Amino acid sequence: MTTQAEKPRSRLDPEPLPRRDFLGLGALGSALAALAVALVGMARLPKAAVLSSPSKKFRVTLPESLPPGQALVPEGRSVAVFRDEEGVYAISTVCTHLGCVVRVTPEGFECPCHGSRFAADGSVIKGPAPKPLPWRKVSGAGGTYVVDEDATVPVGTKVKA
């Protein structure tokens, strides 16, 4: 029996979706979305997520026109390479206070961040830097040298030019 409130269903009307079926389809859609995101993450695994950095050991060729005591700062490196009568040496250009890159001046080095000053041999003239600039290992001869930014050597260590 039909009441006035109910209309007879036409066979062309879609079947109503039961609540349990609707929830099942929602769960299936969520599982498929999670699987797709996981597959995208797995596809990215073979590619490294870190940037490669240049080697801490690098070659530098000192020009013959470089005057004794004048610094050569290779582009993208944190060392200053010098040549004098005794040999070739390298001094770090990273301030020992907070790690700023110091500028090479005729008197030595100067930190632009907090005003530390260093002598030409890297020793502290004016703080707040607590330690002198470290000397870096240099090897080689004949105008081409290898500088190791990770290896610290005693102050005054030079390679014969």
Image (cartoon, helix red, strand yellow):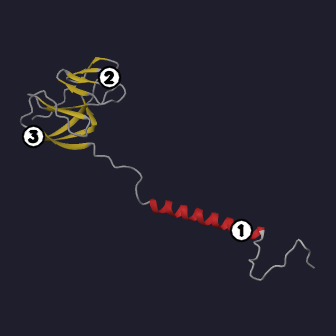
Q: Secondary structure at mark 3?
A: loop
Instruction: Residue at 12% x, 38% y: name it.
Output: 62
Q: In the image, is 19 to the left or to the right of 106?
A: right
* Front position in the image: 126 or 14: 14
Q: Residue furthest left?
A: 64
Q: In the image, is 47 to the left or to the right of 72?
A: right
- Find disc 3 in the rendering and name its residue: 143
Q: Position of residue 6 (x, y in %)?
A: 87, 73
Q: CA distance from mark 1 to mark 3?
A: 75 Å
Residue 106 figure quarter: top left
Q: CA distance from mark 2 to mark 1?
A: 68 Å
Q: Secondary structure at mark 2?
A: loop
Q: Amino acid at mark 3?
A: Gly
Q: Are marks 2 and 1 in contact (CB under 8 Å)?
A: no
Q: Position of residue 116 (x, y in %)?
A: 30, 20
In the rendered structure, find residue 131 and report the number of the disc placed on it: 2
Which tag, 1 or 3, sits closer to the chain's start? 1
* Front position in the image: 66 or 7: 7
Q: Is residue 59 above or below residue 79?
A: below
In the rendered structure, find residue 24 and report the number of the disc placed on it: 1
Q: In the image, is 29 to the left or to the right of 73?
A: right
Q: Amino acid at mark 1?
A: Gly
Q: Residue furthest top?
A: 126
**Circle 1: is it few (<14), some (14-19), or many (20+) Cα within 10 Å?**
few
* Front position in the image: 42 or 6: 6
Q: Is residue 2 above or below residue 64?
A: below
**Circle 2: is it few (<14), some (14-19), or many (20+) Cα within 10 Å?**
some
Q: Secondary structure at mark 1?
A: helix
- Quarter in which the C terminus is drawn: top left
Q: Amino acid at mark 2?
A: Lys
Q: Position of residue 110 (x, y in %)?
A: 26, 23
